[in-house]
Image (cartoon, rainbow, N blue to C red):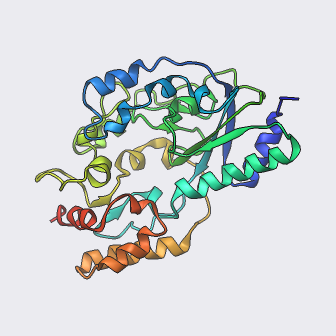
Amino acid sequence: MTYLSREEIKELALQEGFCESGAVQIKEVENDFLRQWLEKQFHASMSYMENYQEIRQNPALLIENAKTIISFLYSYNDERVDKDTMFKIAHYAQRKDYHYVLKQKLNNIIAELQKKYSDFSARAFVDSAPILERYWAEQCGLGWIGKSSLLINKDYGSKVFIGEIVCNYETDYNKEKVENLCGQCTLCLKSCPNNAITQDKGFDSKRCISYQTIENKENISEGFETKGYIYGCDICLEVCPWNKKAKKVEQQDMETKLLVQEVLKKAEQKTLEKKDFKRLAKLSPINRVKYEKFLSNIAAQS
């Protein structure tokens, strides 16, 4: 038997806290959009985006006898802890590092399925392989790619993490693409202070606050508008009507959130020390930057 039912996947996904899941048969895809984006140099210093194009085009290469991509969404739309602070940290980073948390959840699902099906073979990915995550989530019926270039789910908005399982079993595949419900709205484009979002659902990374505060290892250029963000950015997410009406989830990872509040308060009071940063970085995605870069992001606000 090499078949999984949709209900089996859904039940395991819900047990692990995922809000949506869907599946499609693996196929080779055209990545003209990515190629054109790279040709425009919109990836700035992120040269790794140029690598592994063969796998991006054909994720079946990730495991032997791959048949299916199962895509999962996990909402992080709880209450922010930086509403009234001078400095801001992206909402997704106000919690434990999703790379590890979600990958463990996906591996738990794989382990449960392998208990039942001895020949079930799979790998889990959360930003850990050259997979076109938003594309495949859209193909799985989990939402549409909005003008912000983010995946938007009708119920949960775009404040969602995406993860995948690539496996050798077939299942009940999504057959219909979700309608794009952005309509004539251009709030995300208009809200970006540096005009990073382009008209074709793309973005110029070097104009993006998230890029400048995380991926750019140099100091932020003088005059670049960051709107108080010292790690990541949520401006285009916060103005999106679909996020305003999205379902909220219960407050999560309070230990991390309290550390976020402490770091922001000390940054405002100019009393932040490396040990404070390291305590937070040990738990959250902020470990993507070094302390010196974090300080330079803070300095760029004044």
The answer to whether 256 is drawn above or below residue 180 in the figure is: below
Residue 187 lies left or right of residue 246; in this view the side is: left
* 297, 141: nearer the viewer: 297
Residue farthest front in this picture: 64
- Residue at x 28%, y 65% (from the top left corner): 294
**Residue 48 quadrant:** top left
Seen in the image, is 266 located left or right of residue 157?
Answer: left
Work out which quarter of the rendered image holds the N terminus and state it.
Answer: top right
Q: Residue furthest left?
A: 222
Q: Position of residue 287 (x, y in %)?
A: 40, 62
Res 193 quadrant in image:
top left
Where is residue 160 shown, x and y percent of the image?
A: 54, 47
Residue that appears at 51% across and 39% down: 129
Query: Depth check: 154 or 215 in front?
Result: 215
Above or below for 119 versus 285: above
Expressed as whole percent of the image width and height from the top left, the position of residue 240 reads 43, 43
Image point 24% across, 54% down: which residue? 226
* Residue 236 seen in the current view: yes
Q: For this view, does 99 lie left or right of residue 119? A: left
**Is residue 110 depicted above or below 283 in this figure?**
above
Residue 234 placement (x, y as % from top left): 38, 51
- Above-or-below relation of 252 to 268: above
* Residue 149 located left or right of residue 193: right
Is any part of residue 76 visible from this angle? no
Please tell me in which quadrant of the rendered image residue 230 appears.
bottom left
Number of marks in picture: 0
Residue at horizontal 26 percent and vertical 61 percent from the top: 228
Q: Quadrant of the C terminus?
A: bottom left
